[in-house]
Image (cartoon, grey):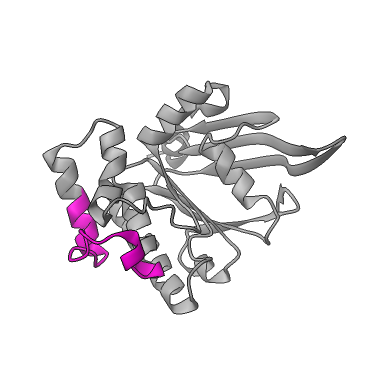
C-alpha cells in the first residue's frame, strides 16, 4: 500500500495558514502573531510552549473563534472558522471545541454535576447516554462522590478536574487548554497533566495545550514553540 496516498486523504484537524494578529494601543499597533503556520493531525496531542506574552493565549482564542485574525486562514474539523459570523463561531465552538483555562471558570451557583452537564444543556443534547458518559468521566477523575458539592467546596485540583470533564462533556473534536496548571502547585499540576494525557488518548480527541512548563513535553506527541509571535 502506498503510505503517501493514505496520508494524503487524512485531513488535519487543525490547519493554520499565515496567521497574523496585532492589537492597537492608541496610535500604535503591536504585532502579536506573525505568519503562523500550524497543522495538527486528528487525535494528536501538541504542546504549545512559550514564555508569557509570546502569543499563546491569542493563538488559542483565534483557534476557538473567540477572536478573529487580521489575516490568514483557520480551519478546524474541515470548517473555515475565520470566515464565520460571531454567532456561527459561537455555535461551532459549542459543538466541536472544548476549552480549559488556567482559572477554572466554574459557575459558583451550580454543583459539580450541574457545571459539567451545562454544555449538553446548551447544545440540547442532554440524553441518558450523554449523562452516563459524563458520570463515567467524573468517576475516572475521582469526582463521583463530589457531584453535589459546589466549586467553593473543592480544592484547586478538583476544580480543574471538573473543568476538564465539562470541556469533554459534549465530546468535542478539538480540546484547547490554556495554561491549565498555572494556578496549581507542582504536584497537583503534574497530576492534572497526566489526566489530560490519559483522557486525550482514551477519547482520541485532538489536544493543543499552551503552557510554559517543560513537563508537558514528555506527555505530548510533539511540541511547538511560540517565540515573539512566530513559531520556532
Q: Position of residue 227 (x, y in %)?
A: 72, 55
Quarter where residue 27 is shown: top right
Q: Position of residue 5 (x, y in %)?
A: 44, 34
Q: Residue at x 28, y 56 (%)?
A: 202
The N terminus - image quarter: top left
Can residue 123 be seen here?
yes
Q: Residue at x 14, y 42 (%)?
A: 129
- Which residues make up the magenta segment? 134-158
Residue 157 covered by magenta stretch: yes
Q: Left of 72 or right of it: where is 15? A: left
Query: In front here: 126 or 202?
Result: 126
Q: How many marks?
A: 0
Q: Position of residue 192 (x, y in %)?
A: 40, 67
Q: Residue at x 12, y 40 (%)?
A: 128
The C terminus - image quarter: bottom right
192 over 175 or under it: above or below: below
Q: Left of 78 or right of it: where is 24? A: right
Q: Position of residue 182 (x, y in %)?
A: 53, 65
Quarter where residue 150 is shown: bottom left
Q: Pick out the residue farthest to the bottom.
A: 187
Q: Pick out the residue farthest to the right.
A: 27
Q: Residue at x 35, y 41 (%)?
A: 172
2 over 81 or under it: above or below: below
Can residue 200 be seen here?
no
Query: In front here: 35 or 112?
Result: 112
Residue 215 covered by magenta stretch: no
Q: Left of 39 or right of it: where is 55? A: right
Q: Pick out the residue farthest to the front.
A: 109
Amino acid at each position: 500500500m502506498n503510505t503517501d496516498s493514505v496520508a494524503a486523504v487524512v485531513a488535519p484537524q487543525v490547519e493554520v495558514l499565515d496567521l497574523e494578529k496585532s492589537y492597537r494601543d492608541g496610535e500604535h499597533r503591536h504585532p502579536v502573531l506573525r505568519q503562523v503556520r500550524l497543522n495538527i493531525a486528528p487525535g494528536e496531542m501538541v504542546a504549545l510552549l512559550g514564555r508569557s506574552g509570546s502569543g499563546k493565549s491569542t493563538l488559542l482564542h483565534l483557534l476557538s473563534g473567540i477572536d478573529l485574525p487580521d489575516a490568514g486562514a483557520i480551519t478546524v474539523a474541515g470548517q473555515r472558522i475565520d470566515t464565520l459570523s460571531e454567532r456561527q463561531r459561537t455555535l461551532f465552538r459549542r459543538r466541536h471545541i472544548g476549552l480549559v483555562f488556567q482559572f477554572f471558570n466554574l459557575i459558583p451557583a451550580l454543583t459539580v454535576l450541574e457545571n459539567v452537564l451545562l454544555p449538553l444543556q446548551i447544545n440540547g443534547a442532554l440524553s441518558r447516554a450523554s449523562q452516563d458518559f459524563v458520570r463515567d468521566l467524573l468517576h475516572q477523575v475521582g469526582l463521583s462522590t463530589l457531584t453535589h458539592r459546589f466549586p467553593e467546596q473543592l480544592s484547586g485540583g478538583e476544580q480543574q478536574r471538573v473543568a476538564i470533564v465539562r470541556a469533554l462533556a459534549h465530546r468535542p473534536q478539538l480540546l484547547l487548554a490554556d495554561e491549565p496548571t498555572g494556578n496549581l502547585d507542582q504536584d497537583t499540576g503534574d497530576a492534572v497533566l497526566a489526566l489530560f494525557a490519559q483522557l486525550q488518548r482514551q477519547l482520541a480527541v485532538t489536544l493543543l495545550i499552551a503552557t510554559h512548563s517543560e513537563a508537558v513535553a514528555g506527555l505530548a506527541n510533539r511540541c511547538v514553540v511560540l517565540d515573539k509571535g512566530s513559531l520556532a
